[in-house]
Image (spheres, rainbow, N blue to C red):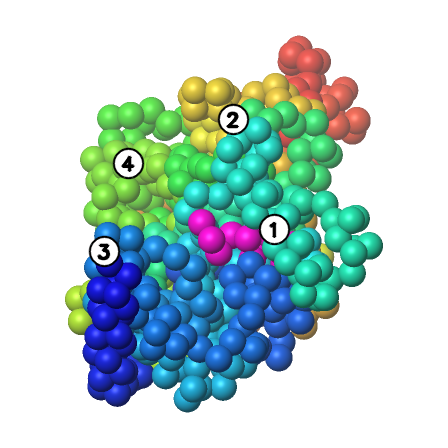
Amino acid sequence: MVAVASVMILGLATLVIVAYANTPIPTEKQQDAIRQESVITYADGSPLARIGTHRENIPLEKVPKHVQNAVLAAEDRGFWTEPGISPTGIAGAMFRAVTGGGTAGASTITQQMARNYYAGLSQERTVSRKLKEILISIRLGKEMDKAKVLELYLNTVPFGRRSYGIQAASRAYFHKPVTEINESEAAMLAAMIQRPGYFATYGPASNPAKQALIDRWNYVLDGMVEQNWLDEGKRAAAKFPQTEKNWSDVPDDPNAGYLEARVLNELKELGINDQMLETGGLRIKTTFNKGLQDYTNKAVKEIRKENGLGNDIQFGLTAIDPRTGGVVAAYGGPDFRKQQFDNSFQGKVQPGSSFKPIVLATALDQGISLQTTMDGSYKRTIGGATFTNDNRAENGIYNLKQMTAMSINTSYVELGQKVQLSNVIDMAKKMGVPAGTEGLDPSFTSLPLGVIDTTPVTMASVYSTFAAKGVHRDAHVIAKVTDNQGNPITNEKGQVLEKLPWEKPTRAFSEGVAADATSAMAAVVKPGGTGTRASLGPRPVAGKTGTTDENKSAWFVGYTPELATASAMWRQDKKGNRLSLIGVGNYSQVYGGTVPADLFKKFMTKALEGKEINQFPPPVNGGEVAPWAKARPVSPSPSSSPSPTNTPDCRPGQPNQPPECRPTASASPSPSITPPSQGQPCNRFGMPVGCNPDLPPDGDRSWWCAQPQHRDHPVCRDDDPPDGNNLNN
C-alpha cells in the first residue's frame, strides 16, 4: 500500500512539474483586489465619510514593523526564510485531496496573496483551483521580491467590516490610521484575518465569537514573542483592545449622518447606483463648510438656552452660497444618532410671510413700481375670504416697499390677485420651489401669506436668487464627482458627468427687479420693519419675517451679497403633531422677528466674520405705478376760507401755465400718488413717511396712548389699558 502511494506521489510530482512550467503569473487583477471605497469630503477636502468596500493602499515602508510582525505571527511565521513549496510537498497535498483528505490546510502568505489578488483564482475549495494557486505561489516566491508580496498581501487581505487591507482595517476598528496603532491593536487586526466573518470585536467576552477572537489574539502575541518580535514584558502587560462599535474614519460627529444622507440622495439623482458607489472608488467633494456646519449645532444650542426653549422646539437653518447654489451649512438636528429626521431638508412647515417676496418679485417683473400704493386696511374681504393684518394699527395705504417692510397681509393678498396667482406660482418655481409642493395652488387666495409646506433649504434657495441678482442656481450639496484619478465618471445611464445639472444657472428675473426687491427687503431690518433683530450692523442685509396662522411656525429668511440663510422654528409633540408657539420659553408669542431673526443674526455674524463688507446694488426704481394703485387721501386745507375762483388750470398740455403749475426739482417721480400729509396719523412703525405722530390713529390706539405724551389726550381717557405686546410677522 505504501509502495502504491509512493508511486502515485511521484506520478503527481511529475505532472506538477509540467504544470508548473505552463502556469505563468496572471497579469489581470481580481475584481475584489481593485475595488475601492468612495470617499466623501467637506469643501476643504477633509474626510466626511467613506462608503462601500473600504480600501486604502499603503506602501510597506509606511506600515509599522510591529504591525507587519503581528500579521506574520498570525499567518506565516517563516515568511522571510521559507524556500517555497517543493514539488514533493505539492504532490502530497494533491494526494490528500485525491484520497479524500480535502484541500484544507494552512496557506502561506504568498498563497493567500495570489488567491486574493489575481484573476482566475476563485475562493472555491477545488483541487484544480488549489493546484493553480500553489503553482502561482511558487513562481511568485521565485520571481517577486518578498517585500512586494507582503505589501500586496497587506493591501488586499479582508478584515471584516467591508474593509480590505491593513489601513482600512485600522480605520474600521480603531478609527485611526495604521501608523498610530500599538502592538495589542496590531495583534487584534492580525487575528481577524483567520475568520473575519465570524469574529466579534465588540461586546462581552461571553460571546463565543468574541472569546474565539481573544484566543486568536493571544496566539498572535505569543508568536511575536517566540519570534523575538515582542518583548516579554510588553506581552505580559498586553490587554485586549477596545474597538469602536461601527466602521468610521471620522471623529464622533453629530452632523455626519445628516450630511452623508444628503449626499447619497443627490448621488441617486445623478444616476450613480450603489455598486458604483461601493466599489468604484469615487471622490465626492461636497459644498459643506465644516467649521460653519459644526457651528450650526452651537448656535441652535445657544439660542435654546438664551430663550428658555425646550426640546419640543425644532429648528431648521440652511445657508446657501448664491454664487453657486451650494449648501454651505444646514442644521439637521441635535445628533443623527438620536434623530435621523433632517430638519433643514425634510422639515416641511409653512413659511408664512417669508413667501411674500416671491409675490413682490412677480409684481416687479411685470413692470409694477415699488411706488404703487395699495389698500392695507386692517380687515378686508378678498376673493370671498376675509383677511386681517397682524395688528389693528396696520390700517392704511402703503406702497409696495412699505407693505413689505411692515408685512401688510391684506395688501399682499390683493397684490397676489392683481398679478395673478398662477404667475406667482411660476415665479416660485423659477426661484427654487419644487413643482408639486403642497399648497402651491392658484385657487388658494391666501397663497401670498405662505400657506405652502416647504423646507428651510428651499426658502434659502429662493432668497439666494435675490442675492444672485435674479439668477437662480439649484440648491445642492455635491460640488464635484470624479474617479480616484480625478477623471469624470459615467453614470448608470451612460451619461458622462463632466458638468453637474446644478452648474447650469437660469435667470428668474432681471438685475433691476432683484435690486428693487432687495431695497424693499432691506427696509424689513431697519427701524419700522418687522425684522430689526436680524440687522448685521454696518453690513447690508435684506430679508423677510414669517409667522404662520396660530403661531405654529416662525421664520426669518435673509441674505447678504455673500450668503442666503433661512432660519425656521416650530413646535411639535412626540407624535410629530404641530403645536402653537404661543407661551413657549421666555415669550408670550414667538414671531419671525424674534427668535428666528436672532438665530439668523448669530449664524451670519459667525459666517461673515472678518470678511469684506460688500454693498447691494442700488435700486433702479424701475417699472411704473400700476393703474389700479390706491390713491392716498388728501387732507383738508387748514384754512377755512373758500378756495379761490381763479385756480390755475394745471392739466398736462395747457398753454402758458403759471409757475405754480411747474414741478420743482424735488417733485415726486410718480405724480399720480398723493404724498402723505402732515395731517395723517402715523401707525406704530412711524409710517407712512411724513405722517404726524401727534395725531391719534384710527382703530386700536392702545400703543399710541401708552406713550407718556399722549396719555392725557381725550381719545385715550376711555380706552382700554395699553397692550404691551410688540407684534411682528
According to the picture, the residue beneath numbered tag 2 turns out to be 571
Q: CA distance from mark 4 to mark 2?
A: 20 Å
Going by the numbered disc 3, the residue's amino acid type is Thr
Q: Nearer the viewer, residue 19 or 719?
A: 19
Going by the numbered disc 1, the residue's amino acid type is Tyr
Mark 3 or 4, which is nearer the eye?
3
Using the rendered view, name the quadrant where residue 656 is placed: bottom left
Q: CA distance from mark 2 to mark 1?
A: 57 Å
Going by the numbered disc 2, the residue's amino acid type is Arg
Residue 300 tag number: none
Instruction: Where is residue 726? Give x, y as percent.
Output: 64, 29
Q: CA distance from mark 1 to mark 3?
A: 32 Å
Sequence order check, earlier mark of 2 and 1: 1
Element type at marker 2?
A: strand
Mark 2 or 1, which is nearer the eye?
1
Residue 99 tag number: 3
Instruction: Where is residue 542? Give x, y as percent.
Output: 55, 56
CB contact under 8 Å: marks 4 and 1: no
Sequence order check, earlier mark of 4 and 1: 1
